[in-house]
Image (tube, rainbow, N blue to C red):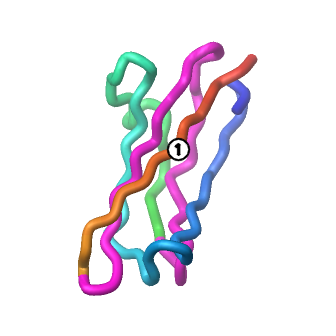
Amino acid sequence: MGANEKVTYTITTTNFASGPASSSMTVKDSNGTDVSSTVATGSVSQTDDVITLKAISGLVAGESYRVDVLFTAGSGAPWSCYLWIDCEE
């Protein structure tokens, strides 16, 4: 992802859990510092088996970020997944 971009990522849960609900996300920089309040805007939502994350922007070039996503599905079982974002110029 570029330092000047704003991207809204989606996660499709069909292969491991149907009907995601109660979703949340956290963005941490390469030092493990929670930077969610400064780089993520909007809200997390669910439609069918797709979770739409908050829009991410304002990342620092050369940094890596981990996005952790927590949600419930089915009988309310907790699930988690994550993705890495490498920020380029």
Question: Residue 64 lies in magenta, yes or no?
Answer: yes
Please, what is the three-letter code of the amino acid marked with disc 1? Leu
Residue 73 % position (x, y):
34, 78
Local crowd size for mark 1, using a 10 Å CA cut-off: few (<14), some (14–19), many (≥20): few
In the image: residue 87, left or right of residue 55: right
Q: Residue 65: where, in percent of width, then height?
A: 50, 29
**On-image quarter of the C terminus:** top right
Residue nearer the viewer, 84 or 4: 84
Residue placed under numbered mark 1 in the picture? 83
Q: Where does residue 7 sit, x and y in percent of width and height?
A: 66, 45
Q: Residue at x 36, y 57 (%)?
A: 80
Which quarter of the picture shows residue 78?
Answer: bottom left
Q: Secondary structure at mark 1?
A: strand
Q: Position of residue 44 (x, y in %)?
A: 45, 61
Q: Quadrant of the N terminus?
A: top right
Instruction: Find out whether residue 49 is within the magenta segment.
Output: yes
The rendered magenta stretch, by its main secondary structure, is classed as strand
Q: Residue at x 62, y 51 (%)?
A: 8
Can you say whether 17 is above or below 54 in the image?
below
44 or 87, nearer to the observer: 87
Write the start and end of the magenta stretch as one range: 46-75
Question: Residue at left 46%, top 82%?
Answer: 18
Relative height, residue 41 to residue 29 (above, below): below
Q: Quadrant of residue 84?
A: top right
The residue depicted at 58 percent of the width and 68 percent of the height is: 12
Figure label count = 1
